[in-house]
Image: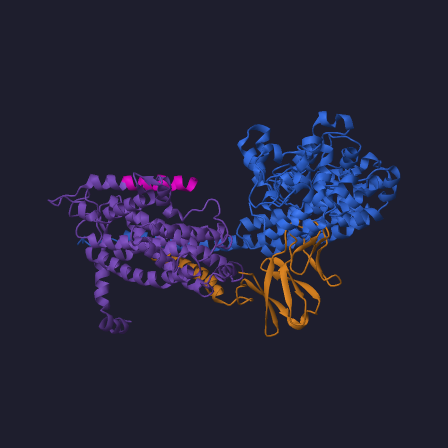
Chain colours: A purple, B blue, C orange
Amino acid sequence: MAAITEWLDERLGWNAIREFAAHKSVPVHSATMWYYFGGITLFLFTIQVLTGVLLLLYYRPSPTEAYESVQFIVTRVEFGWLVRSIHSWSANLMILSAFIHMFSVVFLHSYRRPRELTWLSGIALLGLALGFGFSGYLLPWNKLSYFATKVGTDMAGSVPLIGHQIARFLRGGDDVGGGTLTRFFGFHVAVLPGITTLLLVLHLVLVQKAGMSSPPWIKGENLPQIRFFPNFFLRELMAWYAALGVLGSLAALFPWELGEKADPFAPAPAGIRPEWYFLAPFYTLKLIPSHVWRIEGELLGLFGFGLLAVWWVLLPFWSADRRGTLRQRLVTGAGVALLAYLATFSVLGYLR
Amino acid sequence: MKPLRRGNAFLLAIVWLPLLCGAPAEHKDSCVECHTALEGNLGKPAAVFSQDVHARDGFSCSDCHGGDRNTDDPEASMSRARGFIGKPARTAIPKLCARCHSDATLIHRFKPQQRVDQLAQYQTSVHGKRLAAGDGAVATCIDCHSVHDIREVRDALSPVHPLRLPETCARCHADARHMAPYKIETNQFEQYRTSVHWEALAKRGDLSAPSCASCHGNHGAAPPQVASVANVCGTCHVLFEELYNKSPHQPVFSAMGTGGCTVCHGNHGIKQPSLAMLSGSGAVCAQCHDATSKGGATAAQMAALLGRLQEALAKSDEVLNRAHSDGMEVSEAQMRQLEGREALVKARVAVHAFQTAAVEQPANQGLAIAAETLRAGQSALEERNHRRRGLALSLITILITMGGLWLAIRNLEAKPEAAPKSARR
Amino acid sequence: MAQRRTIVRWLLGGGFSASIVSFLYPAIKFMNPPAIPEAAVNEVSAGKVQDLKVNAGKIVKFGSRPALLIRTGESEFRAFSAICTHLNCTVQYQDARREIWCACHNGLYDLNGKVVSGPPPAPLEEYAVRVRGDEVVLSKRA
């Protein structure tokens, strides 16, 4: 045993890793539970990779075969219904837990110096997760996803000057069709996973480098701590198992619907709506009148969202004033406002 | 308006020589020119005539009303000498229209498919006979086809388009004052609008569904005679007619002088048939057949068979839908269910043989299918439960592991050196 | 204390291995190729050419709906949705009349799917037929 560890150490620097793990610790306070959500998101991402690879065994990315192959997975392949259902549910839970992770970072003010890059990489990862969601939604090629993609890429098309180019790039042509499907499939299983893996490694390294942050209101040198390994890790493991239990139950009791096959010539079905995490902007764009003082409403909305996104991404940089004091209330207020907006508009959009 | 080609104009001139009086100068139409400027009844025909199918084919006022459209002098253009007839008498209208419409050579130049026997048919109709007897209140060509804005039948705005025909007939036939002298009922339109035929026509947009003319004829409109009712219904409901003609009812009903189908189904207000027609207090069979009689027993047996099949199919549907909504794949059984429903349709047709054995065969076929789909649905539900048991099993392993983890953490932290002193942040 | 630790170890080890088995089992089963190895597409095989006589028809399953395949000539095939447009009964081929017939209400269609007589309000949907080797293949018309 000792010989093996030595062999590994010589080649991998095993002991340094062990040393690091032994010293890594996690502060214990009233908000420690929020630390788990980053790990849960990572765990759900792993599940996505595993089930995604399984689905690749049978899925076929062409408009004549996509729907049928998913139907085949769900009906003919043993446990296919389970794998597909877990992939769909896990995708949604992952985005949910990523949002929780982000808002916990905001409310615990963990984004502050020197963790700006961790925040930026995290936001980028969230963006990628949404990209996964948007591209993956189309892959079963059913009615709802077909029209949701049509509407979604249409919105990209209303960006001034380059909008048409963006829409054409996303659709792989002038309209949503077979070209879009192969393209989205490529994004979903190759482009996005590649970028995500790189960013994920960066994100995790940055987290290790800066260590766990504790909220600004918890001060003092002798903050109680627990070791990351094994104490915190075992707890995280428990959280993963709990997540797995929830995921399995959702997948088995509420299998994800496949819907009807997309028909490009059919009229748009009533009640098309995007995935829940796009509902708030979707509903907002619907509410904006078609023209606000000679500017196209949709354009105005997109411009607003763009500004909001930039402002949010730059959060670590405006959260402290010139002297470096944290504008704690301002950030908390902004977080609450954003959360309230997302929650109410998502619910309103869902009820519509 | 398409200008008349010179050749056509020449031919027309020959046909219309007595009316046209002189070679037509192209485009000149003093009738329309003057009457468009007039108001009221004198202006209206000219105003709507551009919509008329005759205008499209190059005909104009003088082709029916006579006179000379080439002169601007009203005295000359509307002189009797130039064949002007003014407003034709109602009794003269069919023959006026027939001057062209019974002329195969003329009609075929515009519409090679169109029939030219409308006048002959009309003369056989009740309308035509009364008109011949001098009754000017009956329908002539223009009452159904309109006048001055006559459209093709397939034009949705035409009063004789399938969707509008019932209303057009009802304009007179639902008018009690108009119908009083003829002593016929006025409720046909009202009844028809409650019928399955109207529903198919108006609500489902099935233009082949029957309206008034489908049974009564159009130009030769007359009520079908008792002996021919089954034939009339049978033009569409062929199998029913076949079965009925071989059934014991056929000779009885014709001896009674009642029109086959209508005895049970009525005429204008034909409803969706249901089991209630066969059995129960409002059953049509019970009008003649005592429940204890042989006929009553047959009706009850047929109703029971159909009822059982209906119920069995509904039960299978219910189980399959439950399985489907729980995410189970039952499309194959659902397709088989279509065959079951087909058997039900056939069994309902077979009722018209009025023999239990005839209904039994398709009904039993359907019952067998329903039993099969029910089994498929139940086994899908069984599979669903199986999945749930699998879930429970893996949830148990998850819970055990979580419990183990919890205990392990407790053990770990019960030890004195729980946390390292040097806190890193 | 030591005894308790043994219990914990057993519980943890047992639960962990059992749960891993319960995750791996479906995954391995999933990878195992199913009995029908390929997804049914918009195309369906309707059997061998020689299995269908000239001037005969047969019902084949097309997705979850029936289709009617008719061999009109030595190498000529036609295929239609077999669902009557009147009340969804399954139609059949009548070789004597060379027409498609619905037994429910005597609806008749010609060999182009057009309504000849009877109550059907609309023609039958026609499918494309190709012969691949000695196999007849139906597909939806694009």
Q: Nearer the viewer, residue B341 or A249?
A: B341
Give the image location of residue B212, x and y in percent.
71, 39
Q: What secondary structure characterizes most of the magenta part? A: helix
Give the image location of residue A352, x and y in percent.
43, 40
Give the image location of residue B301, x and y in percent.
79, 44
Q: Quadrant of residue C45?
A: bottom right
As drawn, the residue found furthest toward the right would be B255
In the visual, does B272 lie left or right of B151?
right
Q: Nearer the viewer, residue B222 or A4?
A: B222
Regarding residue B392, the answer to whether it shows in the image is no
Q: Which quadrant is home to the N terminus of chain B? A: top right
Is A339 included in the stretch rendered in magenta? yes
Give the image location of residue A310, x and y in percent.
24, 48
In the visual, does B244 lie left or right of C124?
right
Regarding residue A290, the answer to whether it shows in the image is yes
In the visual, does A181 lie left or right of A3?
right
The magenta segment is: A336-352
Count of number-bearing discs = 0
As drawn, the residue found furthest toward the left would be A323
Is A58 included in the stretch rendered in magenta? no
Q: Nearer the viewer, residue A235 or B92?
A: B92
Q: Nearer the viewer, residue A345 or A82?
A: A345
